[in-house]
Image (cartoon, grey):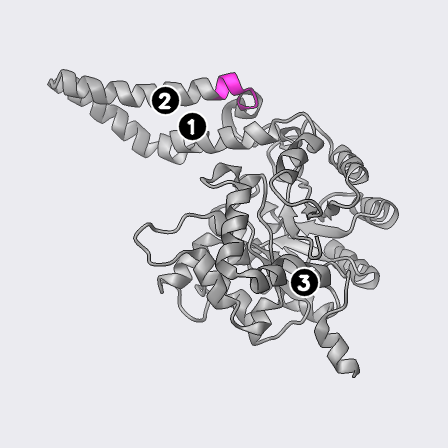
Amino acid sequence: MDKPIYNCHVHTFTAASVPDRFLPLGLNRILKYRIFRRSIIYFIALVKSVMGFLGLLFPSPLTKGISLFYGLIEKAWLSKSSLNHEALLRYDQFFETGGSGSQRAIFERLRVQYPNGTHFVVLPMDMEFMGAGKPTVRYEDQLNELALLRDAFPDAVIPFFAADPRRPNLLELFHEYVGKRGFRGVKLYPNLGYFPNDSKLLEIYALCQAKKIPVLAHCSPGGIRRKGLSAAQAKNFAHPANYAEVLKDFPRLNICLAHFGGAEEWERQITGKAPREGEEESWLSVILKMLTVEKYPNLYTDISYTMFARTPSDRAFNYFDYLKVLLSDPLVAEHVLFGTDYYMVEQEKFSEKEVSIALRSRLGEKLYFQIAHKNPQVYLYEVRPARAKKKRR
């Protein structure tokens, strides 16, 4: 390909890298087996169907009472737990891919959905300090397997290093994998319970800026979070405004705030439910201001997962259309990266390939390759930004 596609946000870690108490009641161990998770899903669906059938066949006070009782349980507990039918369907898709025996097997399922020559930024996850127990596979072993994946596909895999400041040997591992073994970026996940201006991370940023190593951070209210943290507390850790000082202190460091704020924040912006400023301003609006008003030249965002979210069926446009409107501003268009969040998006309705094709069709070739080829090359320090060339003339 003359212009290879860059998918700047994918995962290949297996379910063995997920802490053993990530789900309640030991569901991690059970749901990794297809026969068990499918049996639970079918059983819950069967119970719902039987309750409805009995209510129609025997419309007595007893059957109505039983049906009402089940409905109350479902509404009060199941709908908020990890055992409701919708959640189990999502877990089924997650474990169908994540339950693969190797990162290579997961990557192979991704690679065939893209043209030959496509590059993938592969992001590991360090979940050992989220208060949910220990993973079966040590973090170092996850990185070692990712290094082997890179060696098997050197022209396709761009490995990043996940940095959690609570890991005692963080700097040692950074020097090993980024310094010696050629990992090309750093991944942050503040929702797990740390701020991006942690003193250990400041040391990492300084090294990254000096060595031209980009940083990518989860930046949406959704996703996983440390056990015991409320949604509001997790949002406090992950808020895009937390990066303003980092961007000022490290002006040559390329930082990507992933997910463009997230679909939830896009909805608040689109429907006018978020104020234009203040604490309740949408994260989408905050990121847009950072790009266009504060004009941080080394700030990027990606559209991973957000483009897979379902928009209301009665709306006259979807997220592809809204993204195209946002990209009409050159300051935005030059700082958005294509990414999907594979295989987390396996939980959604559309496949990786379907969304990528739809996005390319809606944006058109020029805008699509701006975010899927040109911008990623600049973000990854593979080429210099055009603005730098203009200044030197």
Indicate the quadrant containing the C terminus: top left, top right, bottom left or bottom right: bottom right
Q: Residues within 10 Å of mark 2 (few under 14, many from 20)?
A: some
Question: Which residue is at the front of the view, 121 or 277?
Answer: 121
Tell me if residue 34 can be seen: yes
The residue shown at (51%, 44%) is: 354
Query: In the structure shown, which secondary structural element does the residue marked by tag 1 occupy?
Result: loop
Judge depth for marks 2 and 1 and give the one in front: 2
Judge depth for marks 3 and 2 and give the one in front: 3
In the depicted structure, whether residue 384 falls above or below residue 260: below
**Res 216 → quadrant:** bottom right
In the depicted structure, whether residue 326 falls above or below residue 372: below
Q: Amino acid at mark 1?
A: Leu
The residue labelled by disc 1 is 83
Q: Amino acid at mark 3?
A: Lys
Residue 186, disc: none
Q: CA distance from mark 3 to mark 2?
A: 48 Å
Residue 374, disc: 3
Residue 44, disc: 2
Query: In the structure shown, which secondary structural element does the residue marked by tag 3 occupy?
Result: helix
Q: What is the total number of numbered labels drawn onto the structure image?
A: 3
Which portion, as a residue range, is magenta?
A: 31-37
